[in-house]
Amino acid sequence: MKNNLLKNAIWLLIAILGASAVGGIALNRGESINALWFITAALCVYAIAYRFYAAWIAATVLAVDQTRATPAERLDNGRDFVPTNKWIVFGHHFAAIAGPGPLVGPTLAAQFGYLPGTLWLLFGSVLGGCVQDMVILFLSTRRNAKSLGQMARDELGPLGGTAALIGTFSIMIILIAVLGLVVVNAMKHSPWATSTVAATIPIAMIVGIYMRHLRPGQVLEASALGVTLLLLSVAGGGWIDGSETLRGLFDHAGLTLAWWVMAYGFAAAILPVWLLLAPRDYLSTFMKLGTITLLAVAIVVLQPDVKMPAITQFIDGSGPVFGGKLFPFVFITIACGAISGFHALVSSGTTPKLLTNERDIRMIGYGGMVLESFVAVMAMIAATVLDPGVFFAINSPAGVVGKEAAAAVATISSWGFPVSVEQMQALAGKMGEASLFARTGGAPSLAVGMASIFGSAFGDGLLALWYHFAIMFEAIFILTTLDAGTRVGRFMLQDMLGNIWPKMAETSWVPSVILTSALVVGGWGYFLYIGVIDPNGGVNILWPLFGIANQMLAAIALCVATGILIKSGKFRYAWVTGLPLSWLIIITSTASWQKITSDDTRIGFFAAANNLSDKLAAGTLPPEKAAIAPQLIFNLHLDAYLTLFFVALLWTIVFDMLRVCALHLAGKPIRPLTEVPHSPSQLAAEWVRD
């Protein structure tokens, strides 16, 4: 009795503290607010959601069964289906889902101020993203680890299922291409980042062999070995960067790195999961979590003030970083830190093939997304503790603020965010860069923010070291999502081809593995190649699609989840996935409509293409812009038509899901549930589970 009272009192205090922190962030006006409130609010919200909401969903809505054998046990083939220690699976899952979104998205969305993005990160994640990840992981586990698209086809029928198969695979190709482009740009002409990322591959294989053959089950030993080698690779990367002899071996242009990234993606898709993918992602998680933990500790020690206003004047759509009003573009830009469709592909791809016990679904599915959301909060803090003038100087394109430094600072200062040329030059010198003006994309400003926090906490004399470490950290963060995404894409394509020739659906059949892996890599590799050689760095052809496509994919996943819940006789719980689904349908449809129909050239794809065409015909473009204009126009049209295609697929799936649910509720015949029958788990080796 006393223990229950104590527990209730503790959770009541956490709730009060969390509510106070959220209220302080939301209601504060006119005065600077300490970054410590952000961490407090995040930890309290996440703790309460995980302890109560996630536990209720797992026990009541999903009814997880720890005595039930998982696909990893029943279909163990030593390649894709492998019963794996839950901490290894957690590390792999987190590394696979945590790509550029939680780092770059919040940084870019800071142009609206710290408040809108922070609230979306906190509540969008616990009510939407975490729920999606956990529910899809559960449903896939109960269906022999089928992919999201295949589950849609099996449960909804040919129309919605085919649309989901095509939509998820198409969006997947775009998402992986964007991941590849970001990581190539991060490693381009950076020997330190390239050598460190390359070193993680043989290190992962050593750890995989150690755990599989040399010392089975000794996770702590393997982890210690891997982390030691990983830290040595980071130090070695700095040494290589300073060596005139060795740095040339890792100093490559974007196109060369793109070919290597494609080769790595192919290898990650075909090699046994225990040899490369799982141990590499598990080890990279140590670097990810170690860096984020260090950042959180530094923030707690320093307690820096957030300098960005709660809300800026750019909520009206006039922002220099990207065009569009607060609604819907803050939700599209942040994406992965709150909810991400890509996660549903991982949750129905590699992760359910490794899961040893259903009891771990809450920790891996819900808990993994909680951790990613916390990473996004850290990114928001790192961006907003910078002087706003510095933030906008780094992230605003030269075409908006001016090519010359003097013009840029004059424009930014006129917005009410003072900054000087001398201030930017001094900052660039400390970071070891020639200039920080117009370093768009979010990654450089995030690195500057992280380096500033680390430098203040652990020594300003190492700012350049911290900056380049942050750039390298971002590259590793992203590449782990690319490799898992490629393998998931292979599974999706095998499922699709298996509807035509069942043999192709066998994940252990080598010809199918090689063929589908090559097709997937060839698909995203083509878009990566076009992005790398694009005069504007690939932004026009790929990045505008990323946010919209990712959220549409989440909506597709929640459609499938809602449909299965209703078919399972759990209509009273359908709101758990139905509410976030409704919100995603609204924001993705609104964003798509604006991107297609807007007359604003900074928002509408067709408007920008027509404007550029008119200038080209009139001969008013400068020669260098005129030379690339046809390619830019093609890219903008491609963006527009792909957006139309994706939104049409989404609504097809939504209406088909509603049709199936209406038939079920009316008592009419529909496709039966495809959940596999219960079979008791026979695993006796406790190391696998615990």
Image: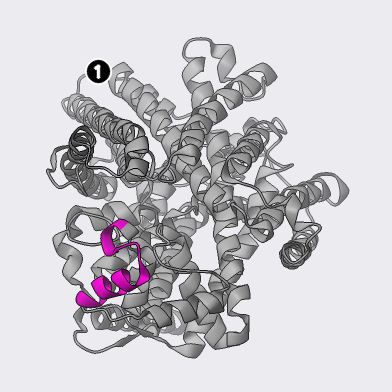
- Which residue is at a point 20% across and 36% down the rendered structure image? 606
- In the image, residue 60 lies at what x, y percent? 36, 51
| 48 left or right, relative to 483 | left
Which quadrant would residue 592 be assigned to in this image? top left
- Which residue is at a point 29% across and 46% down the rendered structure image? 577
Q: Amino acid at mark 1?
A: Pro
Whether 425 is drawn above or below 590: the answer is below
Nearest the viewer among 31 and 98 is 31
- In the image, residue 413 lies at what x, y percent? 25, 77
The N terminus - image quarter: bottom left
Residue 85 visible in the shown view: no
Membership of 528 in magenta stretch = no
- In the image, residue 452 lies at what x, y percent? 50, 80
| 282 left or right, relative to 98 | right
Whether 455 is drawn above or below 396: the answer is below
Which quadrant would residue 437 be assigned to in this image? bottom left
Whether 514 is drawn above or below 584: the answer is above
The C terminus - image quarter: bottom right
- In the image, residue 115 lies at what x, y percent? 25, 72
Q: Which residues are magenta?
A: 399-414
Residue receiving disc 1: 669
Membership of 410 in magenta stretch = yes
